[in-house]
Amino acid sequence: MDPRLEKYAKLLIRVGINVQPGQTLVIRCPVEKAEFARLLVSEAYRAGAREVVMWWGDQVISRETYLHAADEVFDTFRQWKADEMNTLAREGAAFLSIDSSDPDGMNGIDHSRMTRQSRVFGPAIREYRELQMSDKVQWCIAALPEKNWAKKMFPGVPEEEAMGRLMDAICATMRITRDNDPEEAWRRHNETFNARTGKLNELNFKSLHYTNALGTDLTVELPQGHYWEGGSSTSPRGVVFFPNMPTEEIFTAPRRDGVNGRVVSTKPFDVGGVIIPRFAFTFKDGKIVGVEAEGPHHRELLETEIALDEGASYLGEVALVPYDSPISNMNVLFYDTLFDENASCHLAFGASYPTVKGGADMTEEQRLAAGLNQSITHEDFMIGSADMRITGLTHDGREVDVFVDGNFAI
Ligand code: ZN
Ligand code: ZN
């Protein structure tokens, strides 16, 4: 076995999810990665976990289900499944997810089966989602290579070599080398976020204006009392963890009704396994009122995505990532949001993280009133480009360059 895997497992348990003595840990993992899951489980017990609960997944079987199960299956859900998720979250478990899937693995399925399923199951796990999105429980998502994913990223390269290259790429983004201490590397990495979020929080912009040569011309207002976040999160118990690994972004919430203009995507967008190469959204007072995409089928897919519920057609995240971020400079497209979002400025439609003062303890109504979007979905899409310009407008009318030529100017 690749010796880096042991380091990786230890990093995820000790730094990523940072499971505490006496705490329950839930691990989601594809069955193909059982060997790695075993490493995670023994590391977790070594760290003092009370119990590790496994949630196994299998993309091929999920695909078979979406293709062949009886149609009414997708309009129902099992209450006990929702209860399990809600209860574990309420009891303070930590949730670690291992993502290792074929980006094209869901091609050809009837997408409406997926959206119908989310519509019934999404509201049932509101408590779980709420505890996660407000960082009241520790959560962490990380990835492992998968063969079709590797072959897509490195076309024409033999499978084994492609898998090796993907593993190298993942380790580079995870700051793991054969002879370093990745935990120390992550501590140093985490400090770099604070300087930038500190500056942006001090400037306290009223709005950001995005422009580039692709036709992006978008104004995003920011809610009163918003703050920028990046790197690690801290749970109410004071446990520091990393929701996403890798991570290079700093982000906040847009004002739900304060987004106007047009934005053009710059990296492929994955809708339940269908890759949409390029698209544009037009906004009016926060709501997406226009969708453009190259294929008519693609436009339809996007329109279904943003119609999942009322909040799905409003933005929930504004994230800044320099065009020269380490992941961007690797010059590979991962076809996976976990990585590609760290190589590009992005936005998300759907729910926002409660990044306004006091937001974590607000009710849904209070959050809406504070300008934070609510939804059962949250999907990142990439908009960064080499010529991206972002100008911030302060409450006293000053214009400040935030991004010039794709990179931070502050
Ligand atoms: Zn993001
Ligand atoms: Zn996001």
Image (cartoon, rainbow, N blue to C red):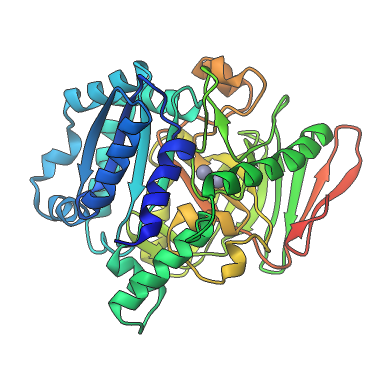
In this picture, is 154 found above or below 220? Answer: below
Quadrant for the N terminus, please.
bottom left
Can residue 291 be seen by looking at this rendering?
A: no
Figure quadrant of residue 225: top right
Of residue 271 and residue 404, the one placed in the foreground of this image is 404
Residue 205 is situated, as x and y percent measured from the top left of the image, at: 79, 37
x 22%, y 54%: residue: 59
Figure quadrant of residue 393: top right
Residue 52 is situated, as x and y percent measured from the top left of the image, at: 26, 30
Give the left or right position of residue 304, taking residue 359 as reference.
left
Of residue 267 and residue 56, the one placed in the foreground of this image is 56
Residue 258 is situated, as x and y percent measured from the top left of the image, at: 67, 37
In this picture, is 174 found above or below 157? Answer: above
Give the left or right position of residue 234, taking residue 13 as reference.
right
Q: Residue furthest front?
A: 179
In this picture, is 224 found above or below 75? Answer: above
